[in-house]
Amino acid sequence: MFAEFAIDPSVLVILCTVAFVAGFIDAIAGGGGLLTIPALLTAGLPPHLALGTNKLAATFGSFTASVTYYRKRLFDPVFWRRSLLYTAIGAVLGTLLVDQLSSESLEKFLPVVILLAAIYTLFNRIVPDDQLELPRQNRRLFWQQRSQGLALGFYDGVAGPGTGAFWMVSTMALYRINLLLTCGVARTMNFISNGVSLAVFLLLGHVFILLGLAMGLCLMAGAWLGAHSAIRFGSRFIRPVFISVVVAIALRLAWQAWS
């Protein structure tokens, strides 16, 4: 299957290197898909196959990062259970509708949103790393978790560039928790939406499995290194990386949409 898309060994090495870098960045700040998807398209894969293959590779990386944060007790699945469920629902809906939606307006709107996210993060007061308490459950959080999970899961199913960054910014704004806890939430929700979207892409036959597995292993290595770096060095390391990534995402999307 997909023999017509045989990858030259030198191109495979480049794709795997890009995947490693993307995994490292994605484990810290999100946005790794903005490296891997253009790389897959440049290698000659059609868009639907590039998206599906990227989901396979990205699932490896997001799984590795999410497990790392969970083991360090930086993610509480009981507190975030509603977000997990509605992220999965949103990802299914987004992936099913991906071929029916016009993305032109969204592509023009995204750079503005992401730049605002970068500005918010730059000037937002950072919660200390040693403050690891989650807010108490209440009716407001009940609806916040559902709407946030559904919206961002849907977006990740449709396209996905910057989903991790959106998770980080919206989580900091809605719940006022520190960057380490925010990283744990973003990486875990990314894993859920990636995994569910991947399942739909597999059913539709839009995944180059061997290439996705090769890139996925490199993403895992990069994600492991990125997650441990973030946990070791804390917000002083995460914040500049995150701001750099969201600015790069915004510029990339702006160039793609408006050039």
Image: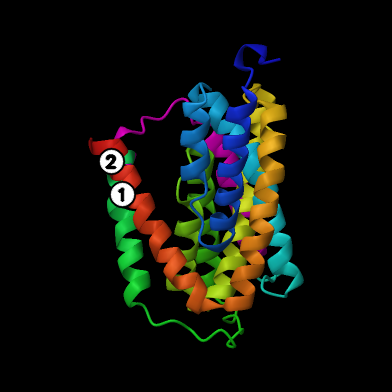
Q: Which residue is mark 2?
A: 255
Q: Secondary structure at mark 2?
A: helix
- Badge 2 crowding class, 10 Å Cα cut-off, few under 14, some 14 to 19, many 20 or more, is few
Q: Residue furthest left?
A: 259
Q: Which residue is mark 1?
A: 251
**Viewer-nearest residue: 13 or 217:** 13
Task: Indicate the amino acid at tag 2.
Answer: Trp
**Is 89 situated above or below 4?**
below
- Residue under the point 60% across and 65% down: 185
**Is 50 situated above or below 78?**
above
- Badge 1 crowding class, 10 Å Cα cut-off, few under 14, some 14 to 19, many 20 or more, is some
- Residue under the point 34% across and 73% down: 122
C-alpha distance separating marks 2 and 1: 6 Å
**Viewer-nearest residue: 81 or 142:** 81
On the rendered image, what quadrant is the N terminus found in? Answer: top right
- Residue under the point 46% across and 65% down: 241
Q: Are marks 2 and 1 in contact (CB under 8 Å)?
A: yes
Q: Residue furthest right?
A: 71
Q: How many marks?
A: 2
Q: Residue furthest top?
A: 4
Q: Secondary structure at mark 1?
A: helix
- To which quarter of the image does residue 7 belong? top right
Q: Position of residue 210 (x, y in %)?
A: 72, 28
**Is 24 situated above or below 252?**
below
Q: Main secondary structure of the magenta part?
A: helix
Direction from residue 224 to residue 139 in the image, left or right: left
Stretch of the chain drawn in magenta: 80-106
